């Protein structure tokens, strides 16, 4: 297939675990970019139920410290050592984007459109995933590495002590980000013939 529509930027987004604190842009530029993603992300019935908190400095470090402390109780031996190394990598990054869903918005949406109520929970999660991708991709285009993490159950109970957030914000994912100090390993791909069909 000829490369007739620009697509090179798609392959630059990767799960980057080798991160450091410096950033190629200012924090304010970063906040603006994340806000632009949040604002422009498509959502079912334009509900805009996704919420974001960006954690920097001590908030970022405390988040990963709490996750590590809680995981110590659930791991042992080599698994614990590997977990500590992994969490230390996230803590070394510049910050973490936390993605939430506002449970109140979802409840109102279900009430407003009862015909679609049973699909709404899936659709808002899909929209949250689109938002995660928009931010991940935009960061990559600006030379900022990131990965997507799901320590939701490990941190949920401790989050209210760390951050004053509305009670109806439910944690969906964590995205540690920073400058890239180690490129990710080469990625393998399934044959596209197995995954893609054209009918014409
Ligand atoms: C919905 C979703 C959930 C994911 N959850 C995790 C996760 O919890 N931890 C993690 O390290 N990576 C997670 N990933 C990243 C995938 O492992 C990664 O995207 C995949 O291996 C392809 O590698 P790439 O991101 O470098 O292209 C997740 C990705 C997606 C799309």
Image (cartoon, rainbow, N blue to C red):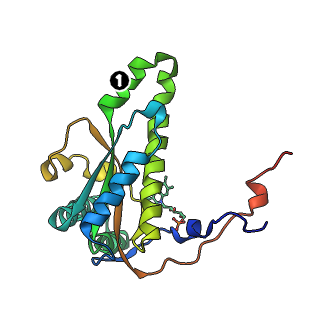
Q: What residue is rendered at 68% in x and 63% in y?
A: 5
Residue 195 in view, yes or no: yes
Q: What residue is rendered at 27% in x and 40% in y?
A: 169
- Locate residue 129, reporting x and y percent: 46, 48
Vertical order, 89 against 4 (above or below): below
Vertical order, 92 against 36 (above or below): below
- Front residue of 36/184: it is 36
Say which quarter of the image contains residue 128: top left
Which secondary structure lies at badge 1? helix
Label 1 CB sits under 8 Å from any ligand 1 atom: no
Residue 151 in view, yes or no: no
The reply, left or right, for residue 58 in relation to residue 147 is left
- Locate residue 72, reporting x and y percent: 26, 63
User: Which residue sits furthest bottom?
Assistant: 181
The reply, left or right, for residue 196 in relation to residue 20 is right
Q: What residue is rendered at 47% in x and 22% in y?
A: 117
Q: What residue is rendered at 34% in x and 65% in y?
A: 176
- Locate residue 181, reporting x and y percent: 39, 82
Vertical order, 197 against 11 (above or below): above
- Front residue of 27/109: it is 27
Quadrant containing the N terminus is bottom right
Say which quarter of the image contains residue 88: bottom left
Quadrant containing the C terminus is top right
Vertical order, 74 against 168 (above or below): below
- Front residue of 180/42: it is 42
Crowdedness near tag 1: few (<14), some (14–19) or many (≥20) residues, C-alpha within 10 Å: few
- Locate residue 158, reporting x and y percent: 19, 50
Location of mark 1 (residue): 108
């Amino acid at each position: 297939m000829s490369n007739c529509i620009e697509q090179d930027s798609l392959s630059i987004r990767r799960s980057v675990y080798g991160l450091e604190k410096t950033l190629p842009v200012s924090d304010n530029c970063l906040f603006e970019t994340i806000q632009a993603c949040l604002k422009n992300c498509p959502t079912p019935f334009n509900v805009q139920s996704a919420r974001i908190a960006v954690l920097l400095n001590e908030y970022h470090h405390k988040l990963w410290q709490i996750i590590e402390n809680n995981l110590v109780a659930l791991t042992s031996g080599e698994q614990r050592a590997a977990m500590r190394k992994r969490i230390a990598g996230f803590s070394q990054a510049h910050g973490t984007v936390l993605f939430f869903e506002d449970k109140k918005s979802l409840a109102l949406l279900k009430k407003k459109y009862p015909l679609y109520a049973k699909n709404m929970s899936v659709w808002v999660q899909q929209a949250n995933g689109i938002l995660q991708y928009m931010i991940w991709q935009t960061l990559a285009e600006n030379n900022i590495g990131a990965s997507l993490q799901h320590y939701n159950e490990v941190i949920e109970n401790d989050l209210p002590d760390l951050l004053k957030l509305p009670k109806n914000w439910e944690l969906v994912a964590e995205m540690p980000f920073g400058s890239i100090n180690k490129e990710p390993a080469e990625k393998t791909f399934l044959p596209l013939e197995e995954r893609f069909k054209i009918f014409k």
